[in-house]
Image: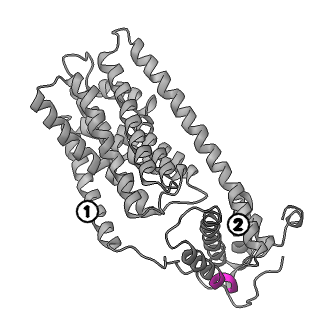
Amino acid sequence: MTEATAVRPPAAPTRYREPFRQRGRTALIVLFVLIAVAGVVGGVVISQSAGDAEGAGLSIFYAMIPIPFLWLVYWWLDRYEPEPRRYKFAAFVWGGVVAVAIALAVEVWAQNYWDLSDEATASFVAPLAEEPAKCLFLLLTFVRARRVIDGVLDGIIYAGIVGIGFAFVENIGYYAASYLGSPDIAIAGSEGVTTTFVVRGIFSPFAHPLFTTAFGIAIGLAVNRRSKVVRVLIVLVGLAVSIGLHGLWNGSLSYGPDNGTGFVLAYLVLAALLLAVAVVAIVVRVRQVRVLERSLSYVADRGWIHPAEIPYLSRFGYRKAARRYARNNYGKPAGQVVKQYQQLATEMAFLHDALMSGRHKPHGVERTYALLDAMYALRPALHLPPALHTTARHY
């Protein structure tokens, strides 16, 4: 493959800007930053309910332990077509601050108004309050920016991140309460916090993400339906399933047999569902590779890119090798150019495939050409490795 022509040193990549920017974006970013700051303060305040510095520190420490692992899982799912960072940040903040505040207010009001027991509140009120509060982020995102969630995998990713944020703040409260102990629990202090962490942080870290994932899948299915009635029905079914899964989990703890059989059965059911969701997510992610290669091949047939570029834009191993080649031979800025070119090509290819498949994409044609223009602007500084011998055979 012939490299792009310029002999001058590669210019630093410029940031691609959407040709159609939504109104209020800056205001929303500032708002969510302020909410995040308030959430940090709130988390510290919640941890102080443990009564002393040790309890507060353990509550925050144990709540943070699963976060890197959970985030890594959703990062892996999101590698091919990364979602905008501002939306992922907003999803986490919504789950950890906004959804927690809404759910807590509803639960406290309902428990006081109807004089409900803690078991009834946890089993019936909590699912009805917490799941709509979490799912509201996906619904608002769907309404405001339909192109952000454009399929099942996107719905799973955003639902999972919202659930991670919610569980993080909720766990701080649970660990602080465990440190204090209660008449029903014989252990307290660091031993009590550790015991609760084993249950919530090790054996069930995906509980909240799983509950909300049902709604995320529904949003992902609804986004490509033309009928408003069908979209509403799918969304309502997804919300009902999210509430039902949450109720099953909480109810097995509150009203299950004393020997724990109910909890074990509920745990096995939810574990099977989690495995099924994981399989679906992996299958969809693997399918993304085929969609990307197919779309890039079609784009190459139209003369928009060179066919020899396709492996370096589609397969992770070749993509990484292309960046390393440019960086080692032409310097760090050249590696950044290749990286940005790959990102632009990926977004363009998925958008083009959606348009060719008949799916509605707001300003889809204009955005496709804008992405191509951004790719062409990088061409003078683009250095890709020589063409693979397999390129002609596959494409």
Report the residue at 32% width, 24% height from top.
Answer: 191
Q: In the rendered view, does 215 fall on the left or right side of 254?
A: right
Q: Amino acid at mark 1?
A: Leu
As rendered, which of 386 and 24 lies closer to the eye? 24
> Which span of residues is magenta-colored?
376-380
Q: Amino acid at mark 2?
A: Leu
Q: Earlier in the sequence, mark 2 or mark 1?
A: 1
- Is residue 157 visible in the rendered image? The answer is no
- Is residue 310 visible in the rendered image? The answer is yes
Single out the mark in the foreground, 2 or 1. Answer: 2
**Mark 1 sits on what residue?**
34
Give coordinates of residue 348: x percent, y percent: 62, 70
Name the quadrant containing residue 52: top left
**Mark 2 sits on what residue?**
313
Q: Residues within 10 Å of mark 1 (few under 14, many from 20)?
A: few
As rendered, which of 80 and 287 lies closer to the eye? 287
